[in-house]
Image (tube, rainbow, N blue to C red):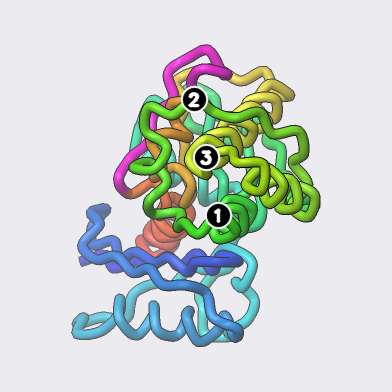
Amino acid sequence: MNYSVGIDSGSTTTKGVLLVDGVIVDRFMCPTPFRPAEAINSAWERLSAGLDNRPFLTLTGYGRQLIDFADKQVTEISCHGLGARFLAPDTRTVIDIGGQDSKVIQLDEKGSLTDFLMNDKCAAGTGRFLEVISRTLGASVETLDTITEGVEPHAITSMCTVFAESEVISLRSAGVPPEAILAGIINAMARRSANFIGRLASEGPVLFTGGVSHSHTFTRMLESYVGTQVRTHPDAQLAGAIGAALIGQQKGRR
């Protein structure tokens, strides 16, 4: 059997998958702690436990250079493209919104990377931004869809994390319902993401990955701005780890 483990050490979440002969047989996910190497070690111990052969280990993400026992380290762009095609084989554009950055990845008809953009200089429009604003309003990211369903978004003028937080507090003081503010934040983030996608000559089908892709409200609003269907997948947050495992699978076969 061909065992391959891919671990994506993200800024906020560490993800991992075990592939056996090209099939996902185990998954791992936990918040990235103060020392990211601890989560990588936990993922490796869980995913490699009980196997009759040592899996090929491929690391990607921010913490990929923090341990010395990986067989290969790969940049997240390549991994996310491969992982997206594994989840949805006809994907041509990947929009990934993670904890601290966002990426747009363009693929050709064979799934090869042709172009990409990455925004890791500003927290606005990321999972961390959404988490901070949600916490300011006394909500959690996990409950956003329930809170904002059918709610008319209130206009948000600032997308800088610091200024947006101040604006949210002012809107609450003015009596604006928190669910309308949250819907407005998601709407502003979706519009910003669509503008980001528009900087590439992107084609459909589009796959939305990363932790924020679990929000149906965000996906729907993003779709309205992009003007084409935006798909997601239950394993979309694992796309980077899946891509890393696929690379390891090819290396292991050699």
Q: CA distance from mark 2 to mark 1?
A: 17 Å
2 and 232: which is toward the camera: 232
The residue at 54%/28% (across/down) is 153
* Circles 3, 2 touching at the beta carbon (< 8 Å): no
The residue at 39%/78% (across/down) is 43
Of labels 2 and 1, earlier in sequence is 1
250 and 113: which is toward the camera: 113
Q: Residues within 10 Å of mark 1 (few under 14, many from 20)?
A: some
Hey, what amino acid is under mark 1? Answer: Leu
Q: Which residue is mark 1?
A: 137
The residue at 60%/41% (across/down) is 175
- On-image quarter of the C terminus: bottom left
81 above or below 249?
above
Span highlighted in magenta in the image: 223-234
Hey, what amino acid is under mark 3? Answer: Pro
* Circles 1, 3 touching at the beta carbon (< 8 Å): no
Residue at disc 1, secondary structure: loop
128 left or right, relative to 240: right
Q: Quadrant of residue 47?
A: bottom left
Residue at disc 3, secondary structure: loop
Q: Which residue is mark 3?
A: 177
Hey, what amino acid is under mark 2? Answer: Glu
Q: Residues within 10 Å of mark 2 (few under 14, many from 20)?
A: some
Residue 32: horizontal and vertical position, in percent?
A: 52, 74
155 and 221: which is toward the camera: 155
Residue 187: horizontal and vertical position, in percent?
A: 57, 30
